Amino acid sequence: MVQFEYHITGQYAAALRHCSPARVLVEHEPGVVAAAGPLAVGAIIRRLIASADRRAWAAYERRIFHDVDRIVVFTERDRGAIRPLAGDTPILCIPFGTEVPVSPLSPTGTRAANLLFVGSFRHYPNVDGAFWLVDRIFPIVRSHCPAATLTVVGADPPAVLSVIGGPSVEVLGSVTDVRPFLDQAAVVIVPIRLGGGMRVKVVEALAAGKALVCSRQAIEGLPLRNREHVRLAETESEFAAAAIELLTNEGRRAAMAGRARAWACAHLGWDRAVAQYEALYGRLRRRQRPLLGPHEEYE
């Protein structure tokens, strides 16, 4: 059996067309979903480029899906997005887990009124979300909470983020360990509106026991309840209002962080995902492809 992680490695499945091992492709974020993001925002030139990019991804993914026996995605939205391209290849939804720490971090944060955004800026949805947060959402928060600060952590941040944000916004770039920043944060904020897959930043914050303000897109694959495990928001005013409420109410913030941690302990371990993969592998082992000659093709 051969398992390919990320769509870009799926191109190598063609080399196994005349071999017997079963083949599994894990789509962390389908290309057609990622390319669709810039179609929704930005200048007309960016949307035209994104449209061409999406068509190219669709052609590429349709081709690689033909060369594998199963496709694994993390969310139902991703499964729906690639279903028209997959043909007869079955698609399974197996959300990933995380290592839940033995003890939670500070449920209210060790740094007063501090918001935290985490995400690699090599990934366009994080660029879009950070600019939206710094330019539009955080100024509303500051107008109601003058002491509020924002920490932005992630590889390769655009330099202009610091210029837009001013002295109350700290843009740190890549860090060796995100836990100290999670510990100091009063609220973790995730204004993601583009892209697919599951968000590691959300999973890690839940496991750490932090209060979160997120978009619905940011929690895809996670059956979390609004106002119980997280605060959900879609518009800049909703994000700002939720952040202000949690920043100014320590008791409410601590209670939400506790419920987030309890949910993570119950649902985010690796056991469920491992069991689903083992079941998948067992089915595929019982249905190994026959070994074909160099000029034969599978039906």
Image (cartoon, rainbow, N blue to C red):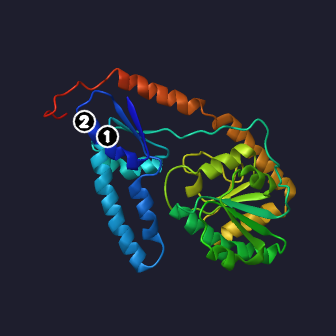
Residue at 69% x, 52% y is: 176
| Residue furthest out toward the front | 176
> Which quarter of the figure has residue 151?
bottom right
Is 100 rendered above or below residue 283?
below
Where is residue 217 drawn, in percent x and y?
55, 57
Residue tagged 1: 13
Count the marks. Answer: 2
Residue at 41% x, 62% y is: 35
Q: Name the mark on residue 17.
A: 2
| Depth check, front residue: 188 or 223 | 188
Residue at 42% x, 26% y is: 281
Q: Name the mark on residue 268.
A: none
| Depth check, front residue: 233 or 168 | 168
- Say which quadrant the C terminus sits in: top left
Q: Is residue 251 left or right of residue 43?
A: right
Where is residue 249 drawn, in percent x and y?
85, 60
Q: Secondary structure at mark 2?
A: loop
Q: Secondary structure at mark 1?
A: helix
Residue at 76% x, 58% y is: 187
Q: Is residue 293 left or right of residue 255?
A: left
| Depth check, front residue: 234 or 298 | 298
Is 114 rendered above or below residue 62?
below
Where is residue 43 drawn, in percent x and y?
45, 79
| Distance of label 2 from label 1 (alpha carbons) | 7 Å
CB-based contact (under 8 Å), mark 2 and mark 1: yes
Q: Is residue 35 left or right of residue 298?
A: right
Callout 1: few (<14), some (14-19), or many (20+) C-alpha neighbours within 10 Å? some
Res 72 visible: yes
| Residue type indicated by callout 2 | Arg
> Which quarter of the figure has residue 103?
top right
- Say which quadrant the N terminus sits in: top left
Q: Is residue 192 left or right of residue 248?
A: left
